[in-house]
Image (tube, grey):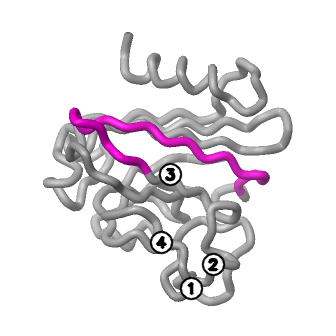
Amino acid sequence: MSLVATFLAVAVAALPTGGTHQPSVVVHERFGVSPEDAITYDRSAVPKGSRAVVAQWSNRDGTTTIDLGVKDLEPNRTYGAHIHTEPCGAKPEDAGPHYQNRVDPVQPSVDPAYANRKNEVWLDFTTDAGGDAASRSTVDWRFRTGQARSVIIHEHATMTHPGHAGTAGARLACITVPFD
């Protein structure tokens, strides 16, 4: 069974609505193999050829679930991961800030009133000995059309304290995703 098929089978079984509906968005990418692929900015942490799957589920109860699966990253390491507002680009900052349901008027947002797991999509994960991991986040809202455009994998777990809330270090890799 392919990485995508295995990932989706596990994801469907664990949906918060208990349903078996299909994801509204699925992206499966390799990092840095061709110009059309996902981008890796740090090849030691996210090696060329490693893979990612992102799926968005628009649940019947009005919530949104995002699943992230990765394969062949640096083993036994904790990464941060968030949805960002712009597609990936040549530079890590091209992906813009974190997508926020209620947008902080002060950017970059480090206020825990805005930079938190209920107002943003946080997908932090820790890889196993083979460099594989999966993460899930469910939020009580839907994305605004065209305003959520990528997933960034960050250097470390997301911080939560004032002045640093939502930060997770350097941007290591990016996957462009057409969230709806």
First along the sequence among labels 3 and 4? 3
Q: Which residue is mark 3?
A: 123
Marks 2 and 1 sit apart, C-alpha to C-alpha, by 6 Å
Callout 1, which amino acid?
Answer: Pro
Q: Which residues are magenta?
A: 125-143
- SS at circle 1: loop
| Residue named by callout 1 | 162
Q: Point out residue 156 in the picture as x, y percentages from the top left corner.
A: 34, 63
- In magenta segment, residue 140: yes
Q: Amino acid at mark 2?
A: Pro
Magenta region includes residue 22: no
Tell me, yes or no, whether the two marked residues, 3 and 2, touch with CB atoms within 8 Å. Answer: no
Q: Mark 2 — residue?
A: 112
Q: Nearer the viewer, mark 3 or mark 1?
A: 1
Of mark 3 and mark 1, the one earlier in the sequence is 3
Q: CA distance from mark 3 to mark 1?
A: 20 Å
Left or right: residue 108 versus residue 111 is: left
